Amino acid sequence: MATRQMRKLQKQQELLRLQSEADREDDESEDEPIVTKPRPNAFAGFAALGGGDDDDDDDQDTEEETKQVEEAPKPVAPASKSKKSKKKKKKGKKTESPAPEEDDLDEIDRVLEELNLKENKNSASDTATSNAARSTGQINELLRVNFQHLKALNEMRKLFGSAIEAARAEQAAEANSRQQQRGAARQNVDLETFLSVPPAVQQRLGKRSMFETVLRTNPFIEGKKTWPRDSTRGLKMVRVTESCDGEPGVAEFAFSHDKTYDALEGNFYGLVQMYDPMQLVYFLARYPYHVSSLIQVSKVAHNDQNSYLAHDLIERALFTFGRATLSDFRKRLGEGTARLDFNRPENRQFFLAGYNQIKNLVLKGTYRTALEWAKFVLSVNHDDPYGVLNWVHVLAIRAYEAKWFIELCNSPLIANEDIGPYFKATMPLAKLQLKDHAGARAAAIESIERLPWLFSALFSALNLDTPRSVWAVQPRDDEEALHTKLYVHLAKDLWNNPAATLLLNEAANAARKVDFFGLPPSPVVSLATARFVYLDNTPELMSAVPRKILHTASPNFDFDPLPPPKEENIFSSPTQKMPWAISEGDGEHRQTRLREEAALQMVRGRLNEEQLRAAVDEARARIDDPEADEVQRGVWQRMVDILTGQGWTGGAGGGVAEEGGEGEGRQRGDVMPGGWEDDFDEGWGDDDFDDGEDHWYEDQLDPELELEFGPGGTPNRRATVEDADDSDEEEAARR
């Protein structure tokens, strides 16, 4: 706005003030006309603000000011005649006044209107921001993480008291005795023993090592003495931004891989394509805190019906993440203001480990700990990429957190979710826990009228007579059928008690039969729900997932199930693109991996040491080839690892030992998993490697000593040295 216009605006305001003073004086004396003579220098100060560069304009403004001030008192005269005469004078003045003055006044009015509009817009945006901040703050408060509740041992101590300590001590003593017997005989070694620390090493390390402190102080998982002593090999955490998606007070973090860990990831992707689980086991034995290997081998243990080992490996993966976290991240977890982006492949491993942890805790019956882990996963990403909300409503009732669950149902988090009505179907049970029978009945009636097909299926699953309000009501489409089956699969047992069934019958009889075709449309099956069903691995649910989501996903590996589309990912290195490269050329890569596997077995069985060294040199030359891509380098690097014995007896450097010496391939610290530098007990001395005898731990890559796999890669038995010595007839009889 020009300086001249500002001065005129100020003059207008001064005239209004003078007129208001005249009105007040007129109220005191209405008989006498009031004539206000303005002082000639009333606006001299305003004129001075404009500077001395436009004297002519200032003189003209002064004349106009005098005219306007003379006109100001005239309308306040009480006599009617004088009013008429003044009106005439006003008309005359209007005709005499120049047109530019009116234009200036109109421009001022427009400026004032624009200022008012801007103020209204700013106030509206401020209101929206404050509402969003309140919603985010409410969700953050509900999803705050209590680190004491993340450890299952704390809940077990609360449930069983000191008896749990005695049971743990007895279990540890039994496991140590079993490991000592197997270690002394060097036979009958199962997968669990193979991946754990020998008892003699545990006793030697004791509480003197720094790693013992690391085991006790991890924020996520309480470490175990049977876990190997090793570093994270380059896994760390970084802070990405101070705010996430415009949420005030929220910071985004991300797990990160350095070059060492990135190389391990490349080797791991190559091993996955070899379709040999034992190679992954050997790789994990060498790198005991490689997260992708821990998750993948946990799946192998699960297929082997070894639930304890499967859970132990998932806990070790979360323990590894806990070692890498920043103090600011842990602080913000307690406030609910830390975020992790699911589109980063490094972060997805954490979400997958968290999901598996929840599932394992549910099997153990530690529902309060499982609920806290579900809150953890939701807290760092409100989009719920693995569909953990499907667990939350069940765990909240199991853990007797009814009040918290009702608050969550009323929060914006559930209001924005498509599965909100199915989630709130459990609210009657929460109110029943709080002894609010009237509220439970009202909530049950509302849910029945909103989801009649769900409660019709629930009555059938509980073997109850179906009332008229929901009788013969079926889901309207495949999406509703999946959500109904999923809810009944997870929450059926919650309703299977006298109090709940009584409430269910009362509410169903009181509910009206609605035209369910007039109800809101069913929610679309999201990728998060598909991931949840895929990991749950229930055949009835798997068949209900739309084919376009589940069966056409590419890539789809157990260490990263149903990832986001490639263009949505945030890659930090070319290695992370390898799963997509493998998937895009699946047939070619598969044939290559099969040929490599057969070649490796043949090489180890038929070549002498000199030929083996030549093969290793050739493979290393291919690794150094600048024209080779990351996939090829990963395959050749893994071939070097296997040929040099690093799968079990190889050293960190990958070299081949010279005869009679201690080369890199014969380092004592790398014979057992973990790579300890401490001396082993008497059974694992230097003589064990130089006496020229064949040992069970040096022949792990022999096919006769590997685990045998049935259909689908499921291990059928554990091999021993005695099995390898059996003749063909004895082997057939034993089987």
Image: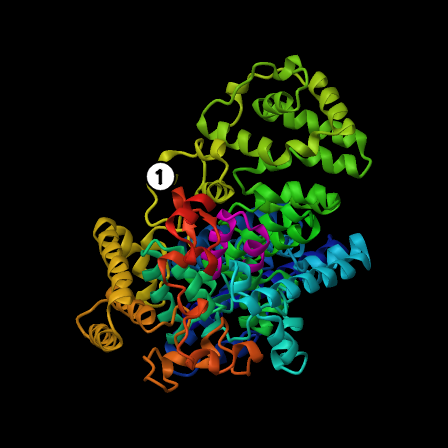
Identify the image quadrant of the N terminus.
bottom left
Nearer-the-camera pick, 168 or 392: 168
Q: Quadrant of residue 18?
A: bottom right
Q: Position of residue 217 (x, y in %)?
A: 66, 72
Q: Residue at x 58, y 38 (%)?
A: 420
Q: Position of residue 281 (x, y in %)?
A: 44, 61
Q: Indicate whether residue 306 is drawn in magenta.
A: yes
Q: Amino acid at mark 1?
A: His
Q: Residue at x 32, y 54 (%)?
A: 566
State whether the magenta stretch is mostly helix, strand or loop.
helix
Nearer-the-camera pick, 128 or 510: 510
Identify the image quadrant of the C terminus.
top left
693 w.r.t. 314: above or below: below
Magenta range is: 294-313
Q: Residue at x 59, y 72 (%)?
A: 328
Residue 170 seen in the figure: yes
392 w.r.t. 206: above or below: above
Q: Coloring scheme of the render?
A: rainbow
Q: What residue is shown with label 1?
A: 551
Crowding at dot 1, Cα within 10 Å, few <14 / some 14-19 / many 20+, comes out as few
46 w.r.t. 596: above or below: below
Q: Position of residue 154 (x, y in %)?
A: 74, 59
Task: Please give left or right for residue 325 compared with residue 530 in the image.
Answer: right
Nearer-the-camera pick, 217 or 735: 735
